[in-house]
Image: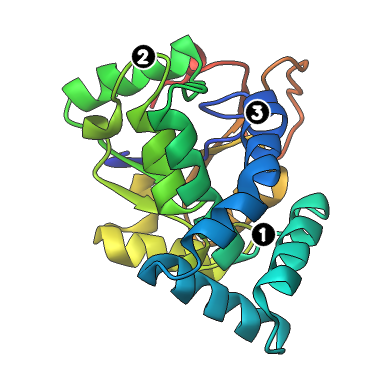
Amino acid sequence: MIKAIVTDIEGTTSSLSFVKDVLFPYARAHLAEFVRSHADDADVKALLNDSRVEVGADLDTGQLIEQFIRWIDEDRKITPLKSLQGLIWEAGYRQGDFTGHVYRDAAENLKKWHAGGMALYVYSSGSVYAQKLLFGHSDFGDLTPLFSGYFDTHIGGKREQAAYEKIAAQLGLPAGNVLFLSDIKEELDAARGAGFKTIWLTRGSMLDAQAEHRQVSSFDQIDF
């Protein structure tokens, strides 16, 4: 029996194009100014130091900015970069530069499941902070009250079975009582390896009855 649902964001609850065509370019365009303006803020200073540890060199602010841009262009899942992007996106959300894209079918079913007593969680490569910003400033208003918790790469990579084992442990549930939703086969493979139930979102693509994970094209087709 499913007692909790853990959902991915990109390509699952939200459009890939929103992240790739809106959020990432916004962070890239504003990164240098933001870092220079906030380098002495405690949270930003900590992220800059974490980034120096990541590259193994004592880079100055200008060199760090160049490194961040390079990581963005390479689509690297570097934890301090993800956290920094979240801080930049916060300014964009608060200024009304954009709202967080969420598919209508995702928003409606998440609300229905929550109302029915299902525990809902998010697991994304974007930072927990960025996750809360997206759902907190979504096209459908503040959806954060629907979720009981959030996970990011601090708990492990999304293609690593150990990360899902840690999530199950934190939820205090047998892995078999947890359903993971994603559009990425390798993530689903890792989750299933940890004992999770899985459903593969294939928005805009044909369903494959022979796929290794059950496929659906929208949240409306999910039953458990």
Question: Which residue in the structure is indicated by mark 2?
Answer: 140
Q: Residue at x 17, y 30 (%)?
A: 117
The label nearer to you, 1 versus 3, is 3
Question: Which residue in the structure is indicated by mark 3?
Answer: 22
Residue 15, position as x, y percentages in the image: 62, 23
Q: Residue at x 36, y 41 (%)?
A: 132
Q: CA distance from mark 3 to mark 2?
A: 18 Å
Say which amino acid is labelled 3: Val
Say which amino acid is labelled 2: Phe
Residue 205 shown left or right of residue 23 in the figure: right
For residue 70, above or below residue 210: below
Label 3: few (<14), some or many (≥20) within 10 Å? some
Residue 196, position as x, y percentages in the image: 47, 51
Tell me the tag on residue 10: none
Question: Which residue in the structure is indicated by mark 1?
Answer: 77
Q: Give the secondary structure at mark 2.
A: loop
Q: Residue at x 51, y 71 (%)?
A: 47
The label nearer to you, 3 versus 2, is 3
Q: Nearer the viewer, residue 12 or 63?
A: 63
**Marks 1 and 3, the one that precedes in the sequence:** 3
For residue 55, above or below residue 194: below
Q: Is residue 49 visible?
A: yes
Residue 52 shown left or right of residue 175 in the figure: right
Q: CA distance from mark 1 to mark 2?
A: 28 Å
Color encoding of the figure = rainbow
**Marks 1 and 2, the one that precedes in the sequence:** 1
Label 2: few (<14), some or many (≥20) within 10 Å? some
